[in-house]
Image (cartoon, rainbow, N blue to C red):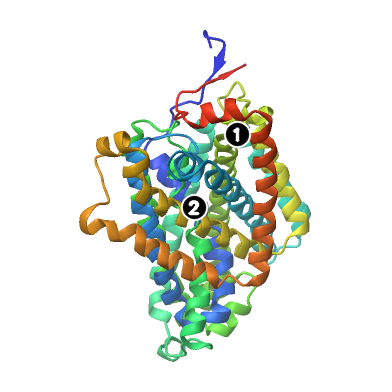
């Protein structure tokens, strides 16, 4: 660059942002977590999906409002909370959301290998941990060479995945069994609610379009439509595919299968069906993994811009990618692949997302008071009767957060405590400089080489 600085690049259109945000979750969400949720919700897993969509729609509306106020990189996760709510709470939001993206990166890497090993008549099986690490490294390289490369691969995977799931649903409709539909939930309404709390993981990430605010063309329009389409498409696919799946296969068999959607496809398409749905799962899981590395990197980068985290995390490579943030994101992913379990990681991730969603709603409530000038210019305001949206979002999110269980709560609090140490040490070391930086809105704050 002629000015001696490296810039983020405005490369993303509506399809790109939709493919990244929706692609984040239509991977492990459908093809892994649905089976876990079915252990609790049974044949009513589709109801759990419908319930899980409610807090996502609410936080989506709040996020759109904040994005229309000020599109910025790392906005939803870090910038809006720090500038509108409080410095400390905002930092913890960004810190939590980084882990909330790294966890799914690890889950999708392992999920890809599980589905690979489920291919029929395949002699070549991979170790799940080693294979997961290899997948992470491959997509690390893709992310390293720039957001344009990421978006091209993402669009191809996303469109194939949506078409594939639609075909899976349509071909499964004639094979539904009324007896299986009537089986209900083994734990009644409690099981449906627990299923919904787990399946929040399947929606987690659909508001993260707002973390790409500086890499989107016409960000107000692009990010808004990316969020709307990113929520709508997965919600329909989730609810309908879960209904068809537990109507074709008894929920006990569906929940007990290592690759549950492959087990359903085998029921009405035979060996071809297993291969077909595994190819769709490959596209879904890899699109999720690709997008999670991308957005997770931007969240860590956004959180580092106020110098509370080490300076090297602010580095941008020649392709316009936050390079050291990407390295650390991939490294943390590999650590979780080696050490974590899917359900525990999923529960911790859900806790972190719900924590962030609550803060997002609080930001919408506080924006008229703490940022009156930006709020007045925003084309969407959640005032009048619309003011109920953030309050209802807080209530629903708190209710779902409570159901995550004591182990997830403990691990989440430990992670937030680690983040608190980083905040206290970083803030005390250069208080005046950080206060000045955090009093500003950081868009177009480019970085020296």
Q: What residue appears at the point 49 percent right and 52 percent down from the top-left corner?
A: 205
Relative vertical location of residue 10 with respect to residue 197 in this rendering, above or below: above
Looking at the rendered structure, the secondary structure element under dot 1 is helix
Give the x, y percent position of residue 417.
Answer: 68, 52
Decide if residue 275 is on the left or right side of residue 311. Answer: left
Q: Check disc 1: other Cα within 10 Å, few if <14, some if 14-19, many if 20+.
A: many
Residue sitting farthest toward the left = 384
The answer to which image quadrant residue 361 occupies is bottom left
Which residue is more in the foreground, 287 or 64?
A: 64
Which residue is more in the foreground, 196 or 409?
A: 409
Which residue is more in the foreground, 202 or 378?
A: 378
Circle 1/circle 2 CB separation < 8 Å: no
Which residue is more in the foreground, 389 or 128?
A: 389
Give the x, y percent position of residue 237.
Answer: 41, 64
Residue 33 visible from this viewpoint: yes
Residue 237 visible from this viewpoint: no
Q: What residue appears at the point 74 percent right and 48 percent down from the top-left corner?
A: 334
Residue sitting farthest toward the top = 2
Residue 246 disc label: none
Decide if residue 84 is on the left or right side of residue 388. Answer: right
Looking at the rendered structure, the secondary structure element under dot 2 is loop
- Tell which circle, 1 or 2, labels the residue nearer the N-terminal end: 2
Q: What residue appears at the point 54 percent right and 51 percent down from the top-left corner?
A: 288
C-alpha span from label 1 to label 2: 20 Å
Give the x, y percent position of residue 99.
Answer: 62, 50
Residue at numbered disc 2: 205
Give the x, y percent position of residue 112.
Answer: 64, 57
Q: Check disc 2: other Cα within 10 Å, few if <14, some if 14-19, many if 20+.
A: many
Decide if residue 155 is on the left or right side of residue 58. Answer: right
Residue 304 disc label: 1
């Amino acid at each position: 660059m002629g000015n001696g600085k490296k810039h983020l690049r405005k490369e993303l259109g509506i399809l790109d942002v939709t493919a990244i945000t929706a692609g984040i979750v239509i991977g492990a969400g459908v093809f892994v977590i649905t089976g876990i949720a079915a252990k609790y919700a049974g044949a009513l897993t589709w109801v759990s999906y419908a319930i899980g969509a409610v807090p996502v729609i609410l936080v989506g509306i709040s996020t759109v409002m904040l994005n229309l106020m000020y599109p910025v990189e790392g906005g939803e996760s870090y910038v809006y909370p720090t500038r509108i709510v409080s410095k400390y709470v905002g930092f913890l939001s960004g810190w939590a959301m980084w882990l909330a993206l790294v966890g799914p990166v690890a889950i999708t890497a392992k999920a890809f290998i599980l589905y690979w090993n489920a291919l029929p008549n395949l002699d070549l099986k991979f170790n799940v941990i080693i294979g997961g690490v290899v997948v992470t490294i491959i997509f690390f390289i893709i992310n390293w060479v720039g957001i344009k490369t990421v978006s091209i691969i993402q669009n191809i995977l996303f469109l194939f995945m949506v078409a594939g799931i639609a075909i899976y649903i349509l071909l499964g409709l004639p094979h539904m069994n009324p007896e299986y539909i009537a089986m209900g939930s083994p734990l009644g309404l409690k099981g449906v609610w627990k299923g919904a709390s787990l399946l929040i993981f399947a929606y987690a990430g659909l508001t993260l379009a707002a973390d790409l605010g500086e890499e989107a063309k016409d960000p107000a329009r692009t990010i808004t439509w990316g969020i709307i389409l990113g929520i709508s498409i997965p919600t329909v696919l989730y609810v309908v595919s879960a209904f068809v799946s537990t109507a074709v296969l008894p929920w006990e068999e569906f929940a007990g299968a290592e690759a549950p959607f492959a087990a359903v496809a085998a029921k009405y398409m035979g060996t071809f069906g297993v291969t077909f749905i595994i190819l769709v799962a490959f596209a879904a899981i890899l699109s999720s993994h690709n997008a999670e590395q991308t957005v997770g990197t931007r969240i860590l980068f956004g959180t580092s811009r106020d110098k509370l985290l080490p300076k090297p995390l602010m580095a941008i490579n020649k392709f316009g990618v936050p390079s050291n943030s990407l390295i650390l994101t991939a490294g943390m992913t590999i650590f979780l692949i080696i050490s974590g379990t899917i359900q525990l990681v999923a529960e911790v991730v859900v806790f972190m997302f719900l924590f962030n969603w609550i803060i997002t709603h609080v930001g919408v409530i506080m924006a008229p008071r703490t940022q009156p000038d930006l709020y007045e210019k925003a084309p969407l305001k959640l005032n009048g009767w619309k003011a109920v949206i953030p309050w209802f979002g807080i209530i629903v999110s708190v209710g779902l957060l409570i159901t995550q269980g004591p182990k997830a709560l403990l691990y989440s609090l430990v992670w937030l405590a680690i983040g608190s140490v980083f905040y206290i040490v970083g803030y005390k070391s250069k208080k005046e400089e950080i206060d000045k930086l955090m009093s500003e809105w950081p868009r177009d704050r480019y970085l020296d080489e």
